[in-house]
Image (cartoon, rainbow, N blue to C red):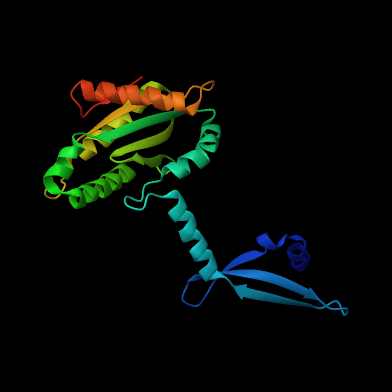
């Protein structure tokens, strides 16, 4: 009997979702009271507002407030799981950095710089897959995590992202470019070693003229 099933569940799992006449979804907690006669009273309490606030809070904790990219707290709390779930594929770790971004802030002001950062994140989000991760690492630097088969297979998606950014129009600033440093996580290493290698690849991109992808 479904009532017995509900009674066996711990309180935190006694939550159901139902749709009202306006096709809006609501979350309810379910409680069951049994009488000596064998009858039950099943009560539903609407907790939609609490659930929405919880989702908002969770999002605020894991996302960068300005750009809506994921943040370093998300990275720190989830990287072990992301590495684990990438198996049997490999995990591509990419650092990307806006070229000469200081000039944007100095010439057009920090407010315009913020607009550029937000637009950049929108472009990258539209160019990567749903299962990929975009993390604001700090300032104008971002990390992308993506499942791949080989290091060589990083080149095509990163070139696609690079070109989307290069041809995009940024109001007042007109155009920006981004340099990419990429590598593949090795099973035996610490994630910081992998990030350092990606950072070296980014340095090569900058040294070789910017607006390019380097893979180590």
Q: Quadrant of the N terminus?
A: bottom right
Q: Where in the figure is residue 9, as x and y percent of width and height?
A: 73, 60
Q: Where in the figure is residue 10, as x and y percent of width and height?
A: 72, 60
Give the residue displayed 63% in from the left and 64% down from the top: 15
Residue 3 visible (yes or no): yes
- Vertical position of residue 140 compared to residue 90: above or below: below
Query: In terms of image quadrants, where is residue 192?
Result: top left
Q: Where in the figure is residue 189, as x and y percent of width and height?
A: 51, 22
Give the residue displayed 33% in from the left and 45% down from the top: 125
Comparing 213 with 130, the one in front is: 213
Residue 174 visible (yes or no): no
Give the residue displayed 82% in from the left and 78% down from the top: 39
Give the residue displayed 62% in from the left and 66% down from the top: 16
Taking the view exactly as shown, the residue that stands out farthest to the front is: 106
Q: Is residue 185 left or right of residue 124?
A: right
- The mark total stands at 0
Comparing 8 with 140, the one in front is: 140
Q: Where in the figure is residue 137, as x and y percent of width and height?
A: 36, 39
- Vertical position of residue 149 compared to residue 105: above or below: above
């Amino acid at each position: 009997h479904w009532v017995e099933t509900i009674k066996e569940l711990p309180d935190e799992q006694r939550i159901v979702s139902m749709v009202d006449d306006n096709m809006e979804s609501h979350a309810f907690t379910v409680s069951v009271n049994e009488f000596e006669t064998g009858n039950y009273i099943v009560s539903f309490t609407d907790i939609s507002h609490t659930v929405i606030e919880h989702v908002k809070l969770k999002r605020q904790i894991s996302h960068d407030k300005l750009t809506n990219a994921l943040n370093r707290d998300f990275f720190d709390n989830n990287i072990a799981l992301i590495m684990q779930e990438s198996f049997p594929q490999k995990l591509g770790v990419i650092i990307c950095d806006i070229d000469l971004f200081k000039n944007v802030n100095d010439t057009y002001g920090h407010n315009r710089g913020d607009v550029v950062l937000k637009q950049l994140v929108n472009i990258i989000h539209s160019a990567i897959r749903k299962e990929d991760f975009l993390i604001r690492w700090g300032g104008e630097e971002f990390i992308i995590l993506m499942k791949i088969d080989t290091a060589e297979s990083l080149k095509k998606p990163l070139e696609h992202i690079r070109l989307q950014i290069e041809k995009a129009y940024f109001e007042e600033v007109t155009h920006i470019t981004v340099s990419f440093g990429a590598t593949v996580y090795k099973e035996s290493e610490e994630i910081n070693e992998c990030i350092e290698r990606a950072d070296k690849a980014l340095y090569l991109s900058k040294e070789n003229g910017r607006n390019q992808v380097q893979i180590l």
